[in-house]
Image: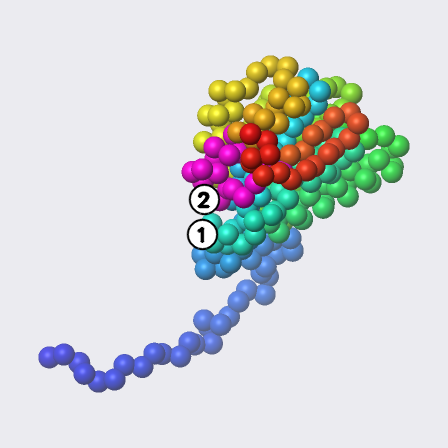
C-alpha cells in the first residue's frame, strides 16, 4: 500500500553545521562548487607566443566568458607588460591571472630596485613557475615572452608550475586549432611584422571553432626597446 502521509524534510542536525576549527588553512583556497565555478569570469582564450629575429610577438583574443557559455566581455586585454622587455598573457580565471601578473610585476620591480639591473628571462620564468605551483592562484596557463642579453625567449607555464621553452607556443581553449595554422605558417627568423600576421591568422582560426575565443586580437611587440601592446580587429591584420 502506498504511503500517502505528508513528507517533511528533516532539519539539519547540529553536527551537520559543524566545521573543523583548523580549516581553511592559511594560503589555501575554499572548495569551489560547480555552480560557483559557472559564475567566475574566465578568459577561455587562445594565446600565442612566437620568437622572431627582432624579438617576440605575443597575440591573444579579446573574449571573456562566464562558465564558458556566456560572453561577459568583448574587449579584454589578455597580455600585460610585466618587465621592461617582457610580457605575460592571461589564461584561466580572470581574477587568478590578474593576481598572478600583479605578483610577478612586483617581484620584477623589487629585483630591479635591489640589484640595479633587470631580471633575466630565465630567472623570471623560474619565478613564474614557482608562483604557479605554490601560490593561491586558480588554474592558469600563461605564456611569458621577453628579450634579454641572452636572446629572445618564449615560455609556456602550466598550472602545476612547469616551464617549457620553445620557439613558439600556444595555450588556452583554442590551442588545438591555432597550433595547426601556426605550424603551417611558422618559419625560422621571421620578422615581428611577419610573426604578427601568422599569429593573427592562428587566433582567427581558433575563434572560428572555439566558443571561448573571439572578438578581435591584442598584439604585443616585444623588442630590446620595450613592449608595445595594441588591439585590432581581425580585418585590420589579415
> Which residue occupies the foreground of this view, 113 or 179?
179
Please report contact status of discs 1 and 2: CB closer than 8 Å, yes or no: yes
x, y percentage for residue 202?
Answer: 52, 30
x, y percentage for residue 223?
Answer: 74, 26
- From the viewer's perspective, is residue 210 above or below residue 188? below
x, y percentage for residue 59?
Answer: 61, 33
Which secondary structure lies at badge 1? loop
- From the viewer's perspective, is residue 190 above or below residue 212? above
> Which residue occupies the foreground of this view, 199 or 33?
199
Instruction: Return the mark for residue 138.
Output: none
Residue farthest bottom in this picture: 5
x, y percentage for residue 162?
Answer: 58, 32
Q: Is residue 214 magenta?
A: yes
Is residue 147 among what the camera can see?
yes
Q: Which residues are magenta?
A: 202-218
Question: First in sequence: mark 1 or mark 2?
Answer: 1
Instruction: Return the mark for residue 69.
Output: 1
Q: Quadrant of the C terminus?
A: top right
Report the residue at 74% width, 33% height from top.
Answer: 227
Return the residue at label 2: 211
Left or right: 56 in relation to 237:
right
Report the residue at 34% width, 78% height from top.
Answer: 9
Residue farthest top in this picture: 188
Amino acid at each position: 500500500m502506498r504511503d500517502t502521509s505528508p513528507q517533511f524534510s528533516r532539519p539539519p542536525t547540529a553536527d551537520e553545521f559543524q566545521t573543523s576549527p583548523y580549516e581553511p588553512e592559511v594560503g589555501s583556497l575554499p572548495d569551489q562548487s560547480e555552480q560557483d565555478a559557472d559564475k567566475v569570469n574566465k578568459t577561455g582564450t587562445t594565446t600565442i607566443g612566437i620568437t622572431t629575429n627582432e624579438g617576440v610577438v605575443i597575440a591573444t583574443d579579446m573574449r571573456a566568458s562566464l562558465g564558458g557559455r556566456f560572453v561577459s566581455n568583448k574587449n579584454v586585454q589578455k597580455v600585460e607588460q610585466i618587465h621592461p622587455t617582457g610580457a605575460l598573457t592571461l589564461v584561466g580565471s580572470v581574477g587568478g591571472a590578474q593576481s598572478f601578473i600583479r605578483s610577478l610585476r612586483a617581484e620584477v620591480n623589487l629585483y630591479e630596485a635591489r640589484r640595479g639591473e633587470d631580471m633575466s628571462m630565465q630567472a623570471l620564468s623560474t619565478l613564474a613557475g614557482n608562483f604557479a605551483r605554490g601560490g593561491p592562484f586558480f588554474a592558469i596557463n600563461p605564456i611569458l615572452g621577453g628579450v634579454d642579453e641572452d636572446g629572445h625567449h618564449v615560455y609556456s607555464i602550466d598550472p602545476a608550475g612547469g616551464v617549457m621553452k620553445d620557439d613558439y607556443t600556444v595555450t588556452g581553449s583554442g590551442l588545438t586549432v591555432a597550433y595547426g595554422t601556426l605550424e603551417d605558417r611558422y618559419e625560422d627568423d621571421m620578422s615581428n611584422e611577419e610573426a604578427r600576421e601568422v599569429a593573427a591568422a592562428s587566433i582567427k582560426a581558433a575563434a572560428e571553432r572555439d566558443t571561448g575565443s573571439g572578438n578581435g586580437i591584442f598584439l604585443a611587440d616585444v623588442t630590446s626597446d620595450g613592449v608595445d601592446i595594441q588591439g585590432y580587429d581581425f580585418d585590420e591584420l589579415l
